[in-house]
């Protein structure tokens, strides 16, 4: 078998689109493998997104390797694996749903502020798309699923963004509102 094909075996978690494994050669990385090959394009798009927004949203993104990899389960992306002080895999915001404290709330507000400040539009604020790492006893919020990104730069030429940007912002704010309401946070 081609030695470039990764064989990850340590399961971390899964979503509707991908399965997240620990990287077979590096315990500080994970490999997120698409379940259906028809979704392979999502991975390339996600890496483009990452490169486009990694500076503006640096506080909330994990490092991504800049290429799609092959695994025995399908294609995947490699990114930093979040682990807690305990050594366990970090848990999602869903796990913290009923234990939301000021540390988490202030980061959620700041995250939302950064999106609006830089006109970065996401639409999927599912609680499982956020991961909270407990590091040195402090909780750090990360947005670990960036595939719902939209940008309107390609059509700037047609000046449509003047119309679409406020609409995109409005839709995103509504989704953020739903997220904050689900967590019983004041908007
Ligand atoms: N960098 C990471 N470190 C630790 N755990 C992670 C990391 N990225 C993802 N996970 C875990 O893997 C799960 C699935 O990841 P992700 O949301 O990217 O999958 P998906 O299938 O693309 O999601 P969706 O269901 O929204 O399509 C997350 O909910 C989280 O528990
Ligand atoms: Mg997800």
Image (spheres, rainbow, N blue to C red):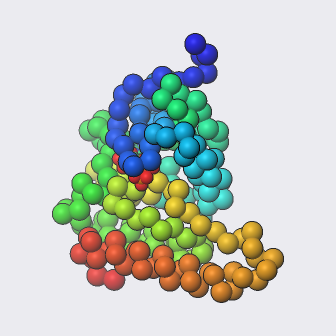
Image quadrant where one finds the C terminus: bottom left
Identify the residue at image location x=41%, y=32%: 22
- Residue 168, located in which quarter of the rendered image? bottom right
| Percent of width and height locating residue 59 | 50, 59
Residue positioned 48% across, 22% down in the render: 7
Tell me where residue 178 sits by quadrant: bottom left
**Which percent across, then down, holds residue 85?**
30, 41
Query: How many numbered callouts?
Result: 0
Q: Quadrant of the N terminus?
A: top right
| Residue found at the very far top of the displayed protein | 1
The residue sitting at 40% across, 74% down in the picture is 176
Q: Quadrant of residue 120?
A: bottom right
Task: Indicate the position of residue 118 as horizontal and vertical percent values.
Answer: 60, 73
Q: Is residue 23 above or below residue 106?
A: above
Q: Residue at x 44, y 57 (%)?
A: 143
Nearest the viewer among 159 and 99 is: 159
Residue 164: tell me if it is visible. Answer: yes
Viewed as shown, does residue 67 lie left or right of 27? right
From this view, report whether residue 4 is shown above or below residue 176.
above
Residue 29 in percent (x, y) is at 47, 35
Q: Which of 44/137 is in front?
A: 44
Q: Is residue 140 visible?
A: no
């Amino acid at each position: 078998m081609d030695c470039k094909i990764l064989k990850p075996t340590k399961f971390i978690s899964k979503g509707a689109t991908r399965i997240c494994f620990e990287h077979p050669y590096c315990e500080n990385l994970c490999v997120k493998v698409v379940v259906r090959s028809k979704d392979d394009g999502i991975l390339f798009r996600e890496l483009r997104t990452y490169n486009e927004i990694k500076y503006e949203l640096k506080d909330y993104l994990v490092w991504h390797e800049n290429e799609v990899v092959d695994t025995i389960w399908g294609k995947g992306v490699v990114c930093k694996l979040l682990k807690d002080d305990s050594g366990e895999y970090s848990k999602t915001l869903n796990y913290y749903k009923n234990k939301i404290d000021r540390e988490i709330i202030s980061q959620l507000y700041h995250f939302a502020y950064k999106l609006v400040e830089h006109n970065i539009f996401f639409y999927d604020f599912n609680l499982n798309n956020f991961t909270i790492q407990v590091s040195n006893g402090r909780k750090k919020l990360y947005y670990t699923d960036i595939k719902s990104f939209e940008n309107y730069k390609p059509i700037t030429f047609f000046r449509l963004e003047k119309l679409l940007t406020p609409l995109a912002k409005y839709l995103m704010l509504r989704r953020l509102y739903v997220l904050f309401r689900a967590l019983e946070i004041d908007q």
